[in-house]
Amino acid sequence: MSREKLYEMLRSLVEHGKAGTMEQVDEVVAIPASDYTDEDKFEQEVERIFKRVPVTVAPSCELPEPGCYKAMDIAGIPVLVTRQKDGTAQAFLNSCTHRGNPVAQGSGKATRFTCGYHGWTFKNDGDLLAIASAKDFGAVDKAAFCLTKFPTLERAGLIWATLDPDSTLDMEAFLCGYDEMLEHFGFKDWHLFDKRTLPGPNWKTAFDGYLDFYHLPVLHKDTFGADFFNQANYFAWGPHQRLSAPSIYAQKTGSEEKLDLSKMNEEDWPIEALTQGVWTIFPCVSIASFFGGGGRGAMISVLYPGKTVGESFTTQYYVMEHEPTDEAVRQGAHDQFAFLETVVAEEDYKTGKRQHESLQSGLIDKVWFGRNEGGGQAFHQWVEKLVKADDAELNRIFAPQLQAAE
Ligand code: FES
Ligand SMILES: [Fe+2]
């Protein structure tokens, strides 16, 4: 069924491409400029979105084998993600149950973690294995001192965690069937080529840019070019949205040739055409695929809010369908990734920072999203809706039966 959906979307993109049109939403919409600058609002978004809904913590290929782990910080919460003996991924609060010191730093391979403060040791499934100088410490029930687990789900080659150990939100239902669409990339068998973390502006300012093709030929005129497309059609699965340019053209990995999809049999449409564009995962992921630059690749950008309203951090994971085996492909992938980093850091995020400073003057009361910016409109509506929802309402919004009925 999800494959048929890919065809349905591409048919509509080709039709619009032929006609030179795009899908537009009903209205031009304004949102208060303070949505981007208000500290209280920002705190609420962190509490009610990032600490309540599943957030992507890693592509599966970052932890390819049992024993792999990484420690990270998400919105002030220390998180440890491990690949356990049985191959499943698990996220934990990276905080020792003795007195709270993080038990792991960085990333690597380890089947156990010894806390650097007093030496308590945990297995990578979170069990407390040993208490240092146990006799001196006194009797405790080790089973009650496991690392705190966060609900964790691995689908479509991505790992999600809900950063509330007591969450009752159904993680699969939250994905609204979007994970089935993402499966078509086959990320679970891909290879992590490189990753890096960039500082950025307010998390919503940063995310707006991923939902927006309107700016491409203007802001990115020196990198993508001034004749780059600026239209997108949006396709939604709950709060998750794919955007893709209406066009009859597509490109295949390793070829400069432009394929005219309108002249091909549908069964010959390549997977690159069926999945092209940007796939965002609410609230903080953007996946953009690339071909050329050394093979089929994708940049998975995962952004989390920083400590203040004007800061965010984005980790860019450059993943490739095949691990490059020769130097030319490796160099091509390296150059492509360096180029994308420059585009995001020097163009998108620098602009976002300037935009934020300007909005902080308080002298602009609204910002606008056009009929061609339906993705941004939908994103802000979802943020608003989820911030307002109490826990029961949140569970209702993502109830499994409602998602199944869509
Ligand atoms: S805080 Fe970890 S052993 Fe004491
Ligand atoms: Fe951009």
Image: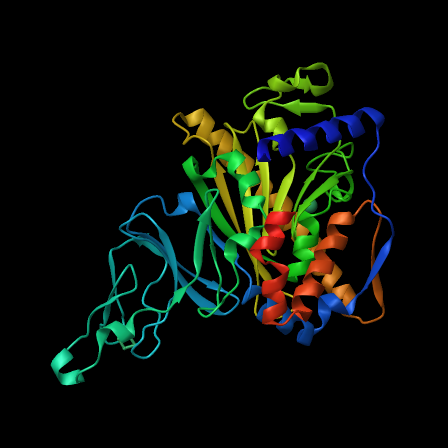
Left or right of 68 in this view: 247: right
Based on the displayed image, in which of its 4 quarters is residue 398 positioned?
bottom right
Res. 281 visible in picture: no
Res. 136 visible in picture: yes
Question: Split into 4 quadrants, where in the image is the N terminus?
Answer: top right
- Residue at image x 70%, y 48%? 211
Left or right of 126 in this view: 246: right
Based on the displayed image, in which of its 4 quarters is residue 234 positioned?
top right
Foreground residue, 206 or 86?
86
Position in image of residue 123 (x %, y %) = 25, 62
Foreground residue, 334 or 276?
276
Foreground residue, 371 or 133?
371
Position in image of residue 355 (x %, y %) = 75, 59
Q: Is residue 307 above or below residue 399?
A: below
Based on the displayed image, in which of its 4 quarters is residue 113 positioned?
bottom left
- Residue at image x 31%, y 67%? 103
- Residue at image x 29%, y 60%? 125
Position in image of residue 267 (x %, y %) = 61, 18
